[in-house]
């Protein structure tokens, strides 16, 4: 049983702030990175919660991210906003471009935002939940580093390439799901390594191409896609639409750019937003209520909606403190210089 430390959301924010400032990150980036990381921990996504501070600190130390990047918003087309992140962490570029993406989706019905030249270290759902909260349907994806073998191969080629989807709901939190196209996120394998836990079968192969449950062997070998050829095809799609289509790096190119620093991936993010009222006009409310009937029929038979566990964790942390693995807490205190 791992020992844990209780920590409030405000204490988590303050700790994150000390770590990031100590590693030289500029104030405006600190604020947006903290919100992303603390939201991950609050929502029970430990692979992309406070653990990410270790990853961000390392990325800052290696010079793989621009500490005081100045993102630039480029109004590329009536339905496309491009934010050049200037080599910085993604959250600030994302929050700067979001209002224009929302305005374009409302004006055009469908709009895209591309973030380029950014370091994406986080979960993807925070990138699209605000869009569904504005009544829009959204999709997002991003390549990462080449850690994942294609179905039928053994050499790492794809990133862990997450895909996220968000759907607005009347009077309820938006439905949002978000997962890697690998069997599991790389961050989850790193957490298993830190905690000395074996991996589940089917997550990875070693450097000889043999199945492994050893985290070290998996990190040195290749991860596997979820759902065999289906996850592999989705990973390929994400390489294309959030790589060459937006003029940014594939996961292979990101790993070459990394040059052995083991920093977070560098590249682009594609976000699509669709306005139901542009598709449906006055009938939008009726058709969105049909979605509610579908959700109900899933839940009635014992299934749960994706995102429900995350929302339950969020609600629980309205009152209960976070519970952080002691070893992680100690590492973060050390990184903060306290
Ligand atoms: P999971 O395999 O845990 O899948 C997560 C998604 O599946 C969540 O939406 C989750 O909802 C849903 N889900 C899980 N179990 C069920 C169930 N029984 N019924 C219905 N829905 C379910 O996550 P991953 O390890 O694949 O990814 C974790 C995070 O890593 C993601 O947030 C992703 O964005 C991030 N990541 C980021 C990368 C990057 O390059 N920036 C790369 C790869 C991953 P719920 O949350 O409610 O459980
Ligand atoms: O967990 O696979 C991952 C990941 C890559 C970039 C950020 N998270």
Image: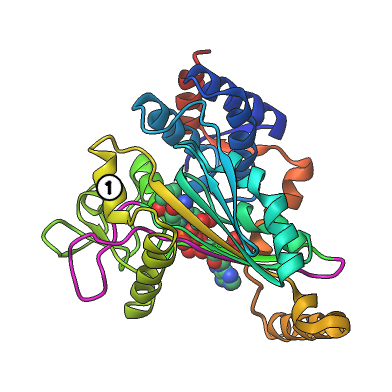
- What residue is drawn where x is 48% and y is 24%? 330
* Left-right relation of 278 to 77: right
Residue 197 in percent (x, y) is at 35, 49
Q: Say if the magenta span includes residue 146.
A: yes
Say which residue appears at 57% left-offset and 20% top-offset: 18
**Residue 173 higher or lower than 1, as above or below:** below
Which coloring applies here?
A: rainbow
The image shows residue 280 at horizontal and vertical percentages of 79, 83
Residue sitting nearer the eye, 49 or 235: 235
Residue 266, given in percent of the width and then of the height, sits at 39, 45
Q: Which residue has dot 1 on it? A: 255
Identify which residue is drawn at 14% across, 56% down. Answer: 207
Q: In terms of secondary structure, where does tag 1 sit?
A: helix
How many marks are shown on the rendered structure?
A: 1
Quadrant of the image occupied by residue 35: top right
Residue at the extreme top of the image, as rendered:
338
Q: Main secondary structure of the magenta part?
A: loop
Toward the left, the furthest residue is 208
Q: Position of residue 288 (x, y in %)?
A: 80, 80
> Which quadrant of the figure has residue 247?
bottom left
What residue is at 34 percent from the left and 68 percent from the top? Answer: 225
Left or right: residue 109 versus residue 27 is right
Tell me, yes or no, whether the highlighted magenta stretch contains residue 10: no
| Crowd band around label 1 with a 10 angstrom C-alpha radius: few (<14), some (14–19), many (20+) | many
**Residue 22 visible in this rendered orientation of the protein:** yes
**Where 51 sits versus 254, above or below?**
above
Is 303 situated left or right of 268 in this image?
A: right
Could you say which is closer to the camera, residue 264 or residue 78? 78
> Is the CB–ligand 2 distance for label 1 below 8 Å?
no
Relative to 136, is 320 above or below? above
- Is there any visible trace of residue 182 in the rendered image? no
Highlighted magenta segment, given as a residue range = 145-171
């Amino acid at each position: 049983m791992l020992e844990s430390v209780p920590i409030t959301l405000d204490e988590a924010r303050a700790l994150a702030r000390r770590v990031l400032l100590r590693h030289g990150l500029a104030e405006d980036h600190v604020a947006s990175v903290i919100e992303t990381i603390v939201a991950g921990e609050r929502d029970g996504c430990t692979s992309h919660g406070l653990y990410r501070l270790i990853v961000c600190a390392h990325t800052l130390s290696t010079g793989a991210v621009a500490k005081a990047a100045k993102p630039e918003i480029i109004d590329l087309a009536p339905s496309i906003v491009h934010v050049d992140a200037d080599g910085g962490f993604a959250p600030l570029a994302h929050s700067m471009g979001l209002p224009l993406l929302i305005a374009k989706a409302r004006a055009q019905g469908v709009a895209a935002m591309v973030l380029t030249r950014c370091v994406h270290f986080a979960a993807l759902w925070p990138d699209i939940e605000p869009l569904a909260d504005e009544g829009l349907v959204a999709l997002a994806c991003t390549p990462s580093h080449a850690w994942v073998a294609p179905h039928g191969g053994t050499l790492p080629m794809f990133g862990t390439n997450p895909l996220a989807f968000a759907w607005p709901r009347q009077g309820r939190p938006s439905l949002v799901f978000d997962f890697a196209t690998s069997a599991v996120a790389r961050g989850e394998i790193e957490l298993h390594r830190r905690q000395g836990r074996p991996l589940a079968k089917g997550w990875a192969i070693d450097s000889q191409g043999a199945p492994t449950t050893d985290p070290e062997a998996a990190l040195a070998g290749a991860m596997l896609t979820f759902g065999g050829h289906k996850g592999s095809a989705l990973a390929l799609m994400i390489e294309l639409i959030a790589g060459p289509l937006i003029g940014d790096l594939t996961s292979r190119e990101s790993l070459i750019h990394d040059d052995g620093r083991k920093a977070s991936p560098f590249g682009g993010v594609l976000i699509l937003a669709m306005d139901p009222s542009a598709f449906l006009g006055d009938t939008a409310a009726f058709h969105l209520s049909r979605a509610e009937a579908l959700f109900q029929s899933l839940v009635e038979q014992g299934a749960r909606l994706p995102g429900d566990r995350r929302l339950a964790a969020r609600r629980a942390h309205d009152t209960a403190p976070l519970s952080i693995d002691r070893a992680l807490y100690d590492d973060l205190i050390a990184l903060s210089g306290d």
